[in-house]
Image (cartoon, rainbow, N blue to C red):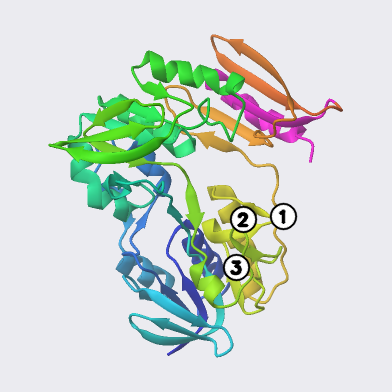
Amino acid sequence: MTADIVVIGSGFAARQLVKNIRQQDKQVPIRLIAADSCDEYSKPEISHVFSLGQYAKDLTRQTAADWAEEHNIMLHPNTRVSRIDAAAHTIETSAGLFTYGRLVLATGAEAILPPVPGNELMYTLNSQQEYCRCEADLQNAEHVLLIGGGLIGTELAMDLNRAGKSVTLVDRSSSLLSTLMPPEVSSRLQHRLVKDGVRLYFNTQIQRVERVNDRLVAYLDNGQRLSADTVICAIGLRPNVELAQAAGLATRLGIVVNDRLNTSDKDIYALGDCAEIEGKLLPYLQPALLAAMTLGKNLNGKAATLILPAMLCKVKTPEMPLHLAGDTGNPELNWNIDVSRAGIIARGMDDAGLLRAFVVSEDHMKTAFTLLKQLAR
């Protein structure tokens, strides 16, 4: 069975792409294939499920059937793709063999687990389906151990704490959000979490996890042992590139694409968490939205190029929200930090005195849009 456009994946990037295609062409045949249920939900909302008392079903915004009918697409939920034959323009799946004119890979990324004994006892929360599988344990847990103090781990730590759970967080770096900002900037958020009762262990890693009676015990490389009802791992994401690699497409950090979202095969495209754009992985909503708009135009016969402006990233920690933009993880920047009861304004300057990055918090959030215009490119 043939469709002019076949999309593998059903996440945010894939859905935005379908929406953009349909805004320009109501009839071009589109087939979407995904391993999950294809129900629509917002992944960022997983960071707030505990304090809101939500279950996995509460995240669903639209069922797969309703979404497929609304956008006039052929939908194949719970279907796994085993092979792409780029020369023959075919896809082998658990639902049969399909052919395509143009193929879009929106295969996303999977949560990384540390290669330690007992990692099968850890939960990850990278999708509605993952949350569904472990929601009973997580909702009933009184003490949660989080591995990873990055964006997701930090957001979950605050949400679990706000839900009344005892929270311990372990990270191998020396501070929260260490890849996103220097410790002088993140220290205010770190202090807030500690004040609210979150226990933080830095400069250490999990060596193994064991089940002891009805508890889990994590052994750290500094000799300490931590006991918890459940363990959540949030140490990062790994782009799903296996299908692309097996099909002979160029991959590095992710599936390599150009500014038109083409892979190394002229009839295959990629976007979202699996795509490497300008040598970077950009697992955020705004780049995915812009990529979907660009690719939607190109699949409808235009010649659009992806232009990525300076973009804001929001840290969803309601007790102390932050906005950041620019090269905030660059260790060569000189940081000017203004701290007051209203929050922080931190500016990362280069040696020439140009603004290259910034972080703002709390009552200063509104200044982010002014600073965004001042960022040197």
At mark 1, the secondary structure is: loop
In the rendering, at what x and y percent does residue 229 appear? 21, 34
Q: Earlier in the sequence, mark 1 or mark 3?
A: 3
Q: Earlier in the sequence, mark 3 or mark 2?
A: 2
Determine which residue is flagged by label 1. Answer: 307
Three-letter residue code for mark 2:
Leu
Determine which residue is flagged by label 2. Answer: 290
Three-letter residue code for mark 1:
Ile
At mark 2, the secondary structure is: helix
In the rendering, at what x and y percent does residue 376 appear? 79, 36
Q: Residue furthest top?
A: 341
Closer mark to the observer between disc 1 and disc 3 = 1
At mark 3, the secondary structure is: helix
Q: For the residue carrying disc 1, how many other residues have a C-alpha within 10 Å: few (<14), some (14-19), or many (20+)?
A: few
For the residues labelled 1 and 3, the Cα–Cα distance comes to 14 Å
For the residues labelled 1 and 2, the Cα–Cα distance comes to 8 Å
Q: Residue at x 37, y 70 (%)?
A: 68
- The magenta stretch is 353-377
In the rendering, at what x and y percent does residue 74 appear? 39, 78
Q: Quadrant of the C terminus?
A: top right
Is residue 282 a member of the stretch shown in magenta?
no
